[in-house]
Image: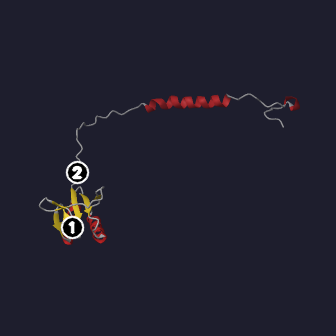
Amino acid sequence: MAFGSFGGGARNSAPMAEINVIPLVDIMLVLLVIFIITAPLLTHAVKIDLPKADSATNVQKADAVQFAIDGDSQRWWNGERVDEAQTIERLRAAGQKEPSPELHLRIDRNARYEIIALVMSEAAKAGVTKVGFVTDPSGAPLPTVLPAGTVATP
């Protein structure tokens, strides 16, 4: 078994220890020619006179609607007491606004889940997609905001 021998029979049975660099040099010369040809093409630029304009971003902040449901299942829209039909009507009107307002839900722990699910479903149908729950970390029941601006705690 003679690895790397080019003839010579049994007297030259040692493996060839030289690296043939001729193919490596050929490949490097081809790459050099390719880079010499393509380098001027990469630096070619087209001069364009672009218009200059200064503008500030026009960010419209969405309104926030404070919606509360107390323990007696009464609904409050920004401090004003509303019934189910008025709630649906106001949610549809809020969904038509651009940008859509945020709906902040303040819900008493004794409120029925059915009413909460109904309000959230109607909000989604109306196009009000930003809904947040307002909670009190202390665990105390949330006060109900009355129309006159006073706060009554249950």
Numbered disc 1: secondary structure: strand
Residue 84 picture location, percent across and down? 21, 71
Please tell me which residue is depicted at 19% across the width and 71% down the height of the picture.
Answer: 83
Q: Amino acid at mark 1?
A: Arg
Colour scheme employed for the rendering of this structure: secondary structure
At 17% from the left and 68% from the top, the residue drawn is: 82
| Residue 18 horizontal/vertical position (percent) | 74, 28
Residue 33: percent from left, percent from top:
55, 29
Q: Which mark is residue 61?
A: 2
Q: Disc 1 versus disc 2: distance between alpha carbons?
A: 25 Å
**Residue found at the far left of this picture:** 148
Q: Measured along the vertical axis of the image, is residue 122 above or below residue 99?
A: below
Most distant residue in the right direction:
10
Q: Nearer the viewer, residue 95 or 40?
A: 95
Q: Nearer the viewer, residue 58 or 92?
A: 92
Say whether residue 127 is left or right of residue 26.
left
Residue 82 higher or lower than 1, as above or below:
below
Identify the residue position indicated by label 1 in the image. 75
